Amino acid sequence: MNAISPDLTRALSSTGSEAAQALPSSLFGLPEQPAHERVLLAADPLSGLKAIIAVHSTARGPAFGGCRLWTYDSELAALNDALRLSQGMSLKNALADLPFGGGKAVIIKPVGDFDRAALFAAFGRAVQSLAGAYITAEDVGTTTADMRGMQAETSYVSGIPRDGAFGGDPSPKTAYGVFVSIDEGVRRVLGRSSLEGVRVAIQGLGAVGWHLAEYLHVAGAELLVADIDNAKLARAQAQFGARIVDVQQIIAADAEVLAPCALGAALNAHSVPQIRARLIAGAANNQLATAADGDALHARGISYLPDYLVNAGGIISVAREYRGEGSESAVMAEVGRIRERVAELLDRVATQGLTPARAADEWARSKLVKPA
Ligand code: NAI
């Protein structure tokens, strides 16, 4: 079984000089619990590429996970992101019953103007150098065009629009998985028979958050939305009758459901005591800043549906596309099965007396083995 060592997690969970001072005693984790199978640092001076590819586990198959292009406070913060995200992919792919392990890549966004095509060509060569141990796709900051551009350098890439076939942008599929999770949670946790009139607060109206808002609006939910982009807020107000909430206030919004769909660590020691929602389910990866925050939510009677369970729609889509399997309706049906897993998790929580976060973790880790 693989897991990032607590030592390493603690040391890398801060950024900048603080992290540099708190170097872990071993980057390799514990002998019986290795942190990651391999981590590649790829640099290309011509294009300005500085990338980290973290392969957490290939126990179930090649490591599959997206590539993030982002501005980080420090290189250690980027490494931390890659390590945490790749571990999350192992759990996500295992719970989704995909024949893939977990990996993730992070490209540190070059400062100033840069040649995007050259950057992704260099990244494609780095992916190719791993000879299939890692397969990439979109994540925050990267596009279907970036994936298509990389095809000249590597075949280990997915999330590419293919004429006449299904595939491409995974975000709508991710949104559908989050939607069915919220719908199931609302029935089971809130005891409501539908989403009609249920107030849902969405943090982040990006590629996933926007599609989620569409699904929820059609189902009759009342939306409260926050984003740093005012144009998206205006559109949501006009199109869905959504109520705009300040980005600082959305966590504490007067809603029954909270859907974090921006970046990670939205659920932390500062925010958890303020939350008024009884159910949390959203797309953002690594929503819990620490495991203790999951315990604190549970203690407050708030049901948190783990991110890697509910946001697996995108990886289900790109995995099918990569394997050349199925159709749009087949992938939607498979994404829809996330509802059954949410129901099973809530059953496990009830019988095992664990928090949803810990029950999901245990369940996923039991599946970090080669599928039969
Ligand atoms: P995106 O970049 O399209 O959207 C993020 C949105 O959050 C943007 O509209 C941005 O303006 C907004 N935002 C940023 N900071 C904010 C803040 N402080 N408060 C409120 N809004 C803020 O990203 P995307 O693709 O929608 O992904 C969202 C999250 O879901 C990310 O954490 C991503 O890793 C995760 N995810 C995405 C998948 C996908 O298929 N796109 C799959 C699985 C996870």
Image (cartoon, grey):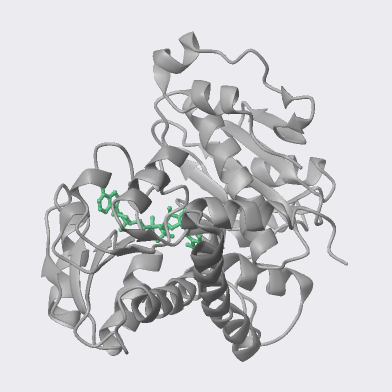
Quadrant hosting residue 31: top right
- Residue under the point 43% across and 72% down: 175
Tell me residue 256's x, y (percent). 23, 69
Observer-nearest residue: 255 or 261?
A: 255
* Left/right of residue 355 with respect to residue 43 in the rendered view: left
Tell me residue 275's x, y (percent). 22, 53
Quadrant hosting residue 344: bottom right
- Relative to residue 102, is residue 23 depicted above or below? above
Tell me residue 358's x, y (percent). 53, 50
- Relative to residue 188, is residue 52 depicted above or below? above
Name the outermost residue toward the top: 21
Q: Does any portion of residue 70 appear in the rendered image?
A: yes
Observer-nearest residue: 245 or 255?
A: 255
Q: Quadrant of ligand 1?
A: bottom left
- Residue under the point 74% across and 58% down: 367
- Residue under the point 45% across and 51% down: 141
- Relative to residue 35, is residue 363 depicted above or below? below
Q: Does any portion of residue 290 appear in the rendered image?
A: no
Tell me residue 22's x, y (percent). 49, 12
- Residue under the point 17% across and 54% down: 252
Observer-nearest residue: 345 or 43?
A: 345
Q: Which quadrant of the rendered structure holds the C terminus?
A: bottom right
* Left/right of residue 300 with respect to residue 150 in the rendered view: left
Q: Which quadrant of the rendered structure holds the N terminus?
A: top right
* Left/right of residue 364 with respect to residue 336 in the rendered view: right
Quadrant hosting residue 64: bottom right
